[in-house]
């Protein structure tokens, strides 16, 4: 009989009680014992839920006090020296120190977990001497067994993935590091085996990326060592987020089960199984329920897939599971009382996915009528949404189809636009500007609250926003900036703001997912064809422009960023969603131009986030991402200056695409990686307008004039002075008023010096 399994369950809780507990503890509002009790209660609730739903393999040790990579590092005592950790189980103060920084020591770096929006803490191996500080998976296993009688399945990040995601060692030290780490894994696993644990899930998502021959060698030697040391333990070697790169090598590893993603790696993994079969001595973890998407599965289609798999793996060796941990989806749709029934019925968050897994598992064994009924029901729910008006905006579909077949192009090449724009604006050399937002003080947020609650009427709120704009237009003029912005005071969030004004979007009440640490995000849901309903930013921008003779930049969020920071429908390709967004945003660009706004910035900080894991798919993605940006911006006159902005990311392999966006000016976050970025530009000649951020906006520190002069000088060594702009790294929304004004004054001062020296 097939069994059901979950790879990991969300930590945050239905009411984000996990987040609240963490923050209360950090703020000193609750003591450690109370905190520990609270977290245990949350953990047990999650286990109980999976137990009640009837999941066969319930994960333990997937729960975390912050992040599972940090947990693994802490388990092995890998704590940077600056936190003066003295051995033994890592105290919470040290654990949170590494995650969040302390007075004396900077936090460890945080980075994206593969191609998700979850961020993990990067382990620092330099000068670490790993030891086993505590067997966390064992503790978690015992707890589930003692408290709930659950025979849990401990989850551990595998040695190869852990090492590959760590930093602070050179390639030549890889084997030395494995020699230190693998024995610790063996120790953990031996203790689990002695305790009577049946199955352990070892996560090796790194196997969906390209590995060298040496790494494949290492992989087999790791698992041979483990198999030799703990032959009795059943290991499920788990991969996810894509199809595996080296199927043939992986299925030969001496483990009991192989877990594959049949949602995001559907094609690749299926082709591999069909071509090469599946070993008769192994169990297949079939990840058929999407652990990252929020949509209800067509259970009938999933049954077809499972039946197809049974041609290669007998049903008793099949485990029906989620494609990855459910960490990436919200907890339950039960609280979503404000969505239309059509939409709500077509959604499945973590808890609903548990139900799907159990049902599919049952369906594999029986074709009882009530099971068949459920399969049909899931199809009907999907069909209903499919037939809704929102998914059938024929005019949008036609317009976008027409756009897809064209190459969007500005009317003039950059060189000519540059001249025309110079003639029109007469900007000085090294024009100064900012990225868009100004400090959103508590007062601004309170005003918005009052308006949302209905205590303020629309006019009162609009007046308040206008007052903010007045203040900041005056300030910007007085500071001496050349290109002004209105300040984005009316926006809470750069995606939500546009989503609320476009058709095709829905907003959940409780659709939170963990982004990093206690920080959760509630992405909008793009469920229908996206359509422009009316002007979104014109009023405020026009108002700001009426208050000054200097140019005010209009400010929009780009199509790719809106898409990558939302949950999107899965019935049409992402490329099409991007074009629909682009088509809608283009109408806003045109409306701004019509209203007399001559510079328009379309922010695309999230382009990199959508980059596919598979190298061979990256160029295709970048091509349509660039095209979407061009669709958004290509219809304006040559004198209208298009700006874009990107936050820090590794640009070296993306410069060509950034250039292909053909924005007249780009501003890029630079200060956190100055050397690297400048180096990228040394290797590539960037031919359009560019502003490399001259100060880091993530800190309240006011940068000195000299520091910024230094940054400018270095940038000018590689960039064309005639195309160079001076701006901060990113928006100033999170900063205070005084530090912002002081920093911008210094920036303008540094610009004056640069102009004199030029
Ligand atoms: N215009 C936005 C702002 O200034 C850009 C934010 C971002 O890059 N994430 O806040
Ligand atoms: Zn930014």
Image (tube, rainbow, N blue to C red):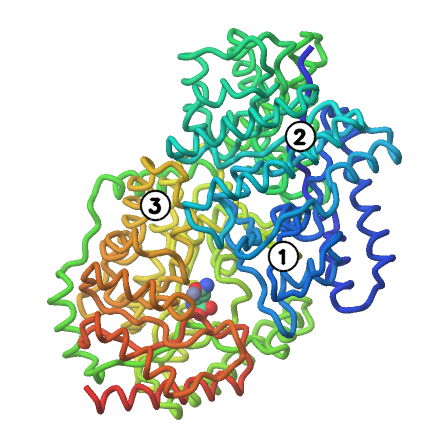
Other-residue count near label 1 (Cα within 10 Å), few / some / many at <14 / 14–19 / ≥20: many
* Residue 394 versus residue 499 in the image, above or below: above
Q: Is residue 66 visible?
A: yes
Towards the viewer: 110 or 435: 110
* Residue 494 versus residue 326 in the image, above or below: below
Which residue is disc 2 drawn over? 6
Which residue is disc 3 drawn over? 579
Towards the viewer: 308 or 132: 132
Residue 193 location (% of width, % of height): 74, 26
Which residue is disc 1 drawn over? 79
Q: Which mark sits nearer the N-terminus, 2 or 1?
A: 2
| Foreground: disc 2 or disc 3 | 2
Query: Residue at position x 61%, y 63% from top?
Result: 81
Label number found at residue 240: none
Separation (CA) of disc 1 from disc 3:
46 Å
Query: Residue at position x 29%, y 38% from top?
Result: 401
Element type where label 2 sits in the image: loop
Separation (CA) of disc 2 from disc 3:
35 Å
């Amino acid at each position: 009989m097939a069994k059901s399994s979950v790879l990991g369950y969300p930590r945050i809780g239905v009411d984000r009680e996990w987040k609240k507990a963490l923050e209360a503890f950090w703020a000193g509002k609750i003591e450690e014992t109370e905190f520990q009790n609270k977290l245990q209660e949350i953990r047990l609730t999650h286990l109980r839920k999976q137990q009640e739903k009837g999941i066969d393999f319930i994960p333990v040790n997937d729960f975390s006090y912050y992040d599972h990579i940090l947990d693994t590092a802490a388990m092995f005592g890998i704590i940077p020296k600056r936190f003066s950790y003295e051995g033994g189980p890592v105290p919470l103060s040290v654990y949170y120190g590494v995650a969040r920084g302390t007075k004396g020591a900077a936090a460890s770096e945080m980075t994206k977990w593969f191609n998700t929006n979850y961020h993990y803490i990067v382990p620092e191996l330099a000068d670490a001497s790993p030891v086993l500080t505590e067997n966390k998976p064992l503790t978690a296993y015992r707890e589930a067994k003692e408290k709930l009688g659950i025979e849990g399945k401990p989850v551990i990040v595998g040695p190869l993935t852990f090492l590959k995601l760590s930093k602070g060692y050179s390639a030549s030290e890889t084997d030395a590091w494995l020699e230190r780490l693998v024995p610790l894994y063996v120790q953990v696993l031996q203790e689990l085996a002695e305790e009577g644990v049946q199955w352990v899930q070892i996560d090796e998502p790194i196997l969906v990326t390209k590995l060298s021959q040496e790494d494949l060698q290492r992989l087999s030697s790791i698992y041979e060592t483990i198999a030799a040391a703990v032959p009795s333990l059943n290991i499920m070697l788990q991969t996810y987020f894509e199809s595996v790169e080296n199927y043939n090598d992986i299925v030969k590893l001496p483990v009991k089960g192989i877990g594959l993603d049949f949602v995001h790696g559907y094609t690749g993994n299926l082709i591999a199984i069909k071509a090469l079969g599946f070993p008769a001595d192994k169990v297949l973890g079939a990840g058929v329920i999407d652990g990252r998407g929020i949509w209800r599965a067509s259970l009938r289609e999933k049954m077809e897939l499972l039946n197809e798999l049974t041609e290669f793996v007998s049903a008793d060796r099949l485990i029906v599971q989620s494609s990855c941990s459910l960490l990436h989806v919200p907890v339950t749709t039960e609280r979503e009382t404000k969505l239309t029934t059509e939409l709500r019925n077509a959604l499945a968050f973590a808890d609903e996915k548990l139900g799907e897994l159990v049902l599919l598992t049952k369906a594999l064994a029986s074709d009882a009528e009530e099971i068949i009924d459920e399969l049909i029901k899931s199809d009907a729910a999907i069909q209903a949404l499919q037939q809704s008006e929102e998914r059938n905006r024929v005019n949008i579909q036609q317009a976008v189809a027409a756009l897809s077949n064209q190459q969007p192009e500005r009317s003039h090449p950059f060189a000519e636009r540059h001249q025309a724009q110079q003639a029109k604006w007469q900007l000085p050399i090294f024009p100064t500007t900012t990225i868009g937002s100004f400090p959103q003080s508590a007062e601004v947020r309170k005003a918005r609250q009052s308006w949302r609650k209905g205590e303020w009427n629309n006019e009162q709120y609009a007046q308040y926003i206008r007052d903010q704009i007045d203040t900041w237009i005056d300030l910007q003029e007085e500071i001496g900036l050349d290109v002004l912005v209105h300040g984005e005071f009316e926006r809470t969030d750069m995606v939500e703001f546009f989503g609320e004004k476009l058709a095709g979007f829905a907003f959940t009440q409780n659709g939170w997912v963990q982004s990093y640490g206690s920080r959760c995000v509630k992405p909008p849901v793009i469920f229908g064809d996206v359509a422009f309903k009316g002007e979104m930013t014109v009023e405020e921008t026009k108002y700001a422009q009426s208050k000054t003779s200097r140019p005010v930049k209009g400010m929009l969020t780009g199509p790719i960023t809106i898409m990558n920071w939302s949950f999107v429908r899965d019935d049409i390709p992402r490329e099409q969603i991007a074009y629909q967004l682009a088509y809608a945003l283009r109408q806003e660009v045109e409306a701004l131009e019509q209203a007399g706004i001559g510079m328009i910035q379309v922010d695309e900080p999230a382009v990199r986030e959508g980059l596919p894991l598979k190298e061979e798919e990256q160029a295709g993605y970048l091509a349509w991402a660039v095209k979407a940006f061009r669709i958004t911006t290509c219809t304006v006159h040559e004198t209208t200056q298009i700006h874009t902005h990107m936050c820090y990311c590794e640009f070296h392999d993306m410069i060509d695409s950034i250039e292909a966006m053909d924005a007249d000016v780009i501003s890029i976050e630079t200060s956190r990686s100055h050397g690297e970025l400048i180096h990228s530009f040394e290797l590539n000649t960037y031919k359009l307008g560019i502003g490399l951020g001259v100060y880091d906006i993530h800190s309240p520190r006011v940068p000195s004039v000299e520091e910024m002069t230094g940054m400018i000088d270095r940038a000018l060594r590689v960039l064309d002075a005639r195309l160079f702009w001076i701006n901060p790294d990113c928006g100033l929304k999170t900063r205070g008023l005084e530090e912002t004004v002081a920093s911008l004054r210094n920036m303008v001062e540094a610009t004056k010096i640069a102009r004199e020296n030029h």
